[in-house]
Amino acid sequence: MVLFTALGCATTAGEPRAMDGAQHSAGDPELAQRYLADPSTPAAFKEGIRSGVVVMGMCPLQAFAAAGLPGPYMVRRDRSKWSGDVPPPEIIEAQCKAPDESVVELMFRNKTQFASTEPKVFRVRFVAGKAVLIDQKGFKE
């Protein structure tokens, strides 16, 4: 299992790099605008995006709209669909329009997910393109 940061730099499995609060503390405005304007986006997802909170069932790009760009991430690719030379960001992005059996874990950092005064790091796991786990544990936990 190889971990990558949002910048595409390899890191050691189980050792996510530190994230700076400025880069990862607010939702992505362009994606937020796109999903808030889309009539097919569920109302609960729109509220999560407005509040800066990732909601169960969101796809990775909807999570970016709510929580901002992730820091470290892990992708276990669906080998029946993706060859080993496909970059993980391409697999992550595809999960919204054409979900598959890939498992994606993204680490975010913000104040809004847990309504805290200080930024908190949290993990979101996506299976079949949907958020199925949101917690404050690291990869492999």
Image (cartoon, rainbow, N blue to C red):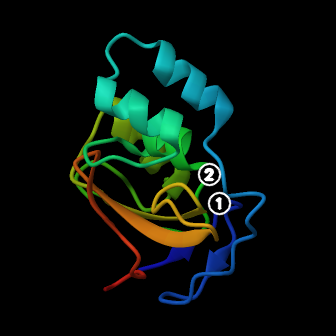
Locate residue 8 relative to residue 85 in the image: left or right: right
Please name the residue that numbered disc 1 is placed on: 6
Please name the residue that numbered disc 2 is placed on: 69
- Above or below — where is 46 with respect to 138? above
User: Disc 2 versus disc 1: distance between alpha carbons?
Assistant: 7 Å
- Above or below — where is 115 with respect to 91? below
Element at label 1: loop
Residue toward you, 28 or 48: 48
Q: Where in the figure is residue 48, as x and y percent of width and height?
A: 42, 39
Residue at position x 61%, y 48% from top?
Answer: 68
Residue at position x 64%, y 76% from top?
Answer: 10
| Of callouts 2 and 1, the N-terminal one | 1
Q: Residue type at mark 2: give it.
A: Leu
Question: Which numbered disc covers residue 134?
Answer: none
Task: Name which quarter of the figure residue 87 lies in.
Answer: bottom right
Residue at position x 49%, y 13% from top?
Answer: 37
Q: Residue type at mark 1: give it.
A: Ala
For the residues labelled 2 and 1, say whether their Cβ atoms are less than 8 Å apart: yes
Q: Where in the figure is residue 128, as x and y percent of width and height?
A: 22, 48
Locate residue 36 relative to residue 81 in the image: left or right: right
Residue toward you, 76 or 137: 137
